[in-house]
Image: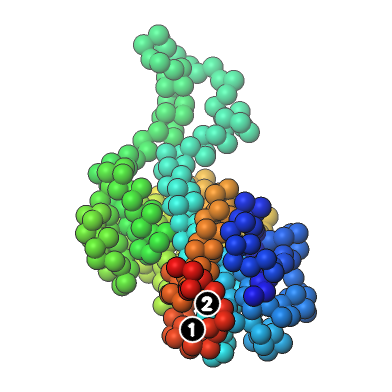
Amino acid sequence: MKVLVTMKFPEEYHGELAKITADYTQAGRGFDGYKLTQEQMIANLQGCDIVLNGVEMIDKAVMEECPELKAIFCGRNEAFASVDIEEATRRKIPVIGCAGRNAVSVAEFTIGLLLSLCKRIALMDYLMKYTDTLVGKEYDDKKQSKEKVSSAWSVDPKGPNAVYGGYPELYGKKFGQIGFGMIGKEVAKRAQAFGMELLISDPFADKDAVKEMEGRVVPLEVLMEQADFISINCNVNKGTIGMVNEEMLSRMKPSAYIINTARAPIMDYDALYRLLKENKIAGAALDVYPIEPLPKNHPLLELPNVVLTPHFAGQSKEITNHMNEMILRDLKLLLSGKRPVNICNPEVLDAFFQENEELLILKTKE
């Protein structure tokens, strides 16, 4: 059995794969940092039964030129970003993704953005380090109250406490979770830990998980109207593109905040900008954008009530480990004649098992 590996594949996982097959090679972005072209991908896949893929594209043209390819593993949250799943299904090729590999990373980052935004942490850090707004000041102390306070910053009516204070506490507030999949659940757990009430908008929400977190499933418009903090963590598809539009954003409270660590097409960014600029909503924290990298002159960069990060939420150092553990687990399941956890097209499994008995090398070792 010959395997091509184009995803990141640290040395500590080579032994696990070697127990399955010694005939594997590495190439591509995950190996040397350079993404394979279509022509290079086809050349590297010749004679391969299985590919453990990263960001390289495996489309119809690649599959046509690689007739021996029997299973595709993709180390991305959304396998369809690198694999033509429809074509693979037509060819009875199982596609196994890596959904949830960065769920903890994105969830923690989302809460970090929320705190940085609503507590004005990012703004205070910027003002302290890069301006003279808060440092090197001598505030008027007409009431001679310096000795009565813990910091002279709190004395002057133009000081930071007076100008920037009054931020909201999280405890007891309503947290609106748009999308309740792997990432959404992790975000909701952390929001609940702060003592917030969970409002969930997801037609496919796991009822048991909702009940366990004492959440409440509500229509999107209700969530937008009632939530104090809103996090977008749903997938991009025909049903979610443009879902958080101007009409929905306009339903938000003037005191509410919104965070998007999912994908930009879900939300109307032009409408968001207008509402933020007019202070009709309190603030936004964004990790994804309609154009990436964000242009230098983008209007969002001018707003003080926005925290911006460069599509960075899913970049923890542990993600590579999560990915490899999930892929190797599902590879072993497939080669044991069992259903992989992250199978994208389960309808092809019966045909795969029947037509590729020679690949089920772990089935007899149980």
- Pointer 2 with pointer 1, Cβ within 8 A: yes
Q: Is residue 39 left or right of residue 326?
A: right
Front residue of 188/25: it is: 25
Q: Position of residue 337 (x, y in %)?
A: 46, 77
Give the x, y percent position of residue 5: 67, 67
The residue at 44%/14% (across/down) is 141
Q: Is 3 located above or below residue 168 in the figure?
A: below
Tell which of 27 and 76 is nearer to you.
Answer: 27
Residue 146 drawn at (x, y percent): 42, 12
Q: Amino acid at mark 1?
A: Phe
Which residue is tagged 2? 360
Q: Residue at x 27, y 69 (%)?
A: 219
Q: Is residue 248 visible?
A: yes
Q: Quadrant of the C terminus?
A: bottom left
Judge from the rendering whether residue 125 lies leftward or rightward of residue 30; answer left or right.
left
Instruction: Using a 10 Å C-alpha cutoff, classify the residue at mark 2 as few (fewer than 14 neighbours), some (14 to 19) or many (20 or more).
Output: some
The one nearer the camera, 328 or 218, is 328
Residue 149: x and y in percent read 38, 15
* Residue tagged 1: 353
